[in-house]
Every structure is written in structure tokens, then in C-alpha cells.
Image (cartoon, helix red, strand yellow):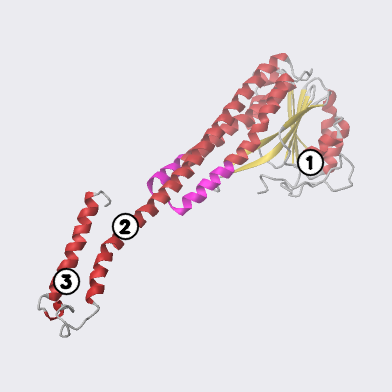
Amino acid sequence: MSRFYKRIRKRAGLSPGTLLPPEERKVTKVRLSLFDYDERRFEEKELQTVEEAFPFKEKPTVTWLNIEGLHELDILEKIGRNFNIHLLVLEDIASAGQRPKVENHDDYLYIVLRMLDYDQERKTIQGEQLSIILGSNFVILFQEREGDIFNVIRERLRNNESRIRKSPADYLAYRLLDTVVDYYFVILEKLGEDIEEVEEQVMGDPSEDILHDIHRLKRELIYLRKSVWPLREVINGLIREDTRLIQDTTDVFFKDVYDHTIQVIDTVESFRDMVSGTMDVYLSSVSNKMNEVMKILTIMASIFIPLTFIAGIYGMNFNPEVSPWNMPELNWSLGYPFTLSLMLVMAFGLIFYFKKKKWL
């Protein structure tokens, strides 16, 4: 449930912009890495202190500062003071679980989205909040935990001939967003394989375990939809935002990300319909199995009812010596075989009748 709902941690009486450490410490030590580049120069380094990144703010090159871990609030405060980031923005960065959004603060854009990964062993989607500060010549990326999906971007930054080296900071922000959205398709592919597997099992021999798999898929799709649906508004806001931080030449790339986001949303909705249909098929299969069992039991009961009636009559044991009408078959030498034969004839007659009616 923690993936779907984050408890509001802001205590009553605290002033706006008060930073609170995350409840869950996802890294032991905050990791700081920096890329500084332009078309001709490139520098990559691991930072020991956040102050090492501050001189790059005034350089004409593009700087990408990556922070992995949010529990050291003094780092956030120092970044906020040096890059003039509003206290409310810092509060949102420290409070994981924000809804994807974009905010225009004139000197920078604040973008929130979720980076997702698929746990193949548990078959669940794991997510973390990404906070991006886009300035005129810098991008600051805040992550909850160590590790991400941006190694492709790092490799292209190391390549002198790559387009990203020749482009401003807004293009780097686009590449980060595009990589996150593209990875949604990888998750959808894995979810699609799980859905197909569950559908085959439902159509074959549905069991109670399948019901748990269906509910799991529904939860994962709800979580994915919750993460992706607001992102459409974020990308659309970046396209329509009247800001000098995003150049006209970059708008076309954000429009491409917008199209990909729509495709992801459409696929999620299709998967939700498929899972709902699979649930209906499962319930219908269980109902049909129950109907088959009830039909067999009803047929058996229908066969044995007249047999029980005959056995009940001859079980009354009226004395035939008192009256010739009192069970004359009791003194008949063929009375027992006759009764059994009558029962067999009635049983086979009912079976023949049921088959003729196609009830069997």
C-alpha cells in the first residue's frame, strides 16, 4: 500500500519549506557525481563535497549534477542557497511521493516524475521519485536511491561527436525524460508477457493461484497508471511553457516524448481491459466448473430418487399372510431379482433419457 499512498509527513505548526528527512534511508551515503561539457571540452568527476560543484554554475559549459540519496538535508540546503532554489521546492524534493508535475520559477524549471523498474523475481514494479532542476546552463538530478537507467546518456556524453555534447541544458533534460519514458515500454513488455501467461492458464486449467496473479497484475497496472498519467500534463506543460529555458529547437523533441507518453497510457488502458477480461473469464470458468459438478450431482440424485422410492416401498415389510395385498412379492421366489432388475431398468432408462436430452 505504501506505493499507492504516501503518508503526509509535514507536522502541524511547521513553517512552509521545512525539510524533513525521508522515513526510509535508501542509501548509506549520498553519492555526488558531476558532468561538465560542451562541444570541445568534457569533465567527469565524483564529488566528495557538494561545494565542489558550485564553481561550475558560472561556467558557460553545461553542467549535470547528479545526487543519489536525499537523507542529508544539509546538502539540499547548500544546493538551494547556491542555485537560488525555493524552500518549497526543496521540501518537495525531500518528500518522496510527489505527483509528477512541472513548476516554472523563472530562473529554473522544477520537474518531478517517477523512474520505474520491474522486479522480475517478485513480478512487481519498483519506483522512485526523480526531481530535475533545469537552469540555463545546468541540470540537477535528485534520486532516492543509487543506480539508474541513464548510463546510455553518460556514454554519449563521453563521445565528442554525440548530439548531446553540442546541445544546451534543455536537451539534456529532454534526454533524461525520454530515457525514463522509453523504459516504461520495457516494463509494459514484461507486463504483457505476464498477462499472456495468465490468460493461457485461465483458458487451460484455472486455479486459485491464478486469481492472486490477476489481482497482482491489476495492482501493478494501477501503480503504473498513477505514475504515467500525470506525466502527460508535465510534458505538455513543458511544450506550452513560455520560458527562455527551453529553446524552440528542443520543443519538437518534447513533443516526441509526449507522443510516447500517450502510447504508454493507451497501452496501460488496454492492459487493464485485458486483465479485467481475464478476471471475467476466470469467474466464468469457475462458475462453469461449479455448474458441471452440480449437474452431475443433480443427475445422480435424479437417478437414485426412484430407486430409493422402490427400496422404501419394499422396506415397509407388510405381512402377506394377513392380506394378499400386503407385499405378495415377499413370498415370491423371484421377488428380489425382480426388484433389482426394475431398479436397473429405471436407472438405465433415466440415463438414456438424459443423453437424449443432451444433459449428459
Dot 2 corresponds to which residue?
A: 296
* Amino acid at pointer 3: Thr
Q: Specify few, some or many for label 2: CA neighbours under 10 Å numbering under 14, 14-19, or 20 or more.
A: some
Q: Is residue 109 magenta?
A: no
* Dominant secondary structure (helix, strand or loop) of the stretch shown in magenta: helix
Q: Is residue 85 left or right of residue 163?
A: right
On screen, 23 above or below 138? below
Q: Specify few, some or many for label 1: CA neighbours under 10 Å numbering under 14, 14-19, or 20 or more.
A: many
Pinpoint residue 122: horizontal percent, then vertical percent: 55, 48
Pinpoint residue 201: horizontal percent, then vertical percent: 42, 46
User: What stretch of residues is rendered in magenta?
Assistant: 196-220
Pinpoint residue 333: horizontal percent, then vertical percent: 9, 78
Q: Which secondary structure, mark 2? A: helix
Q: Is residue 200 magenta?
A: yes
Given contact means CB atoms under 8 Å apart, are the residues at marks 1 and 3 in contact? no
On screen, 197 above or below 240? below
Which numbered disc covers residue 94? 1
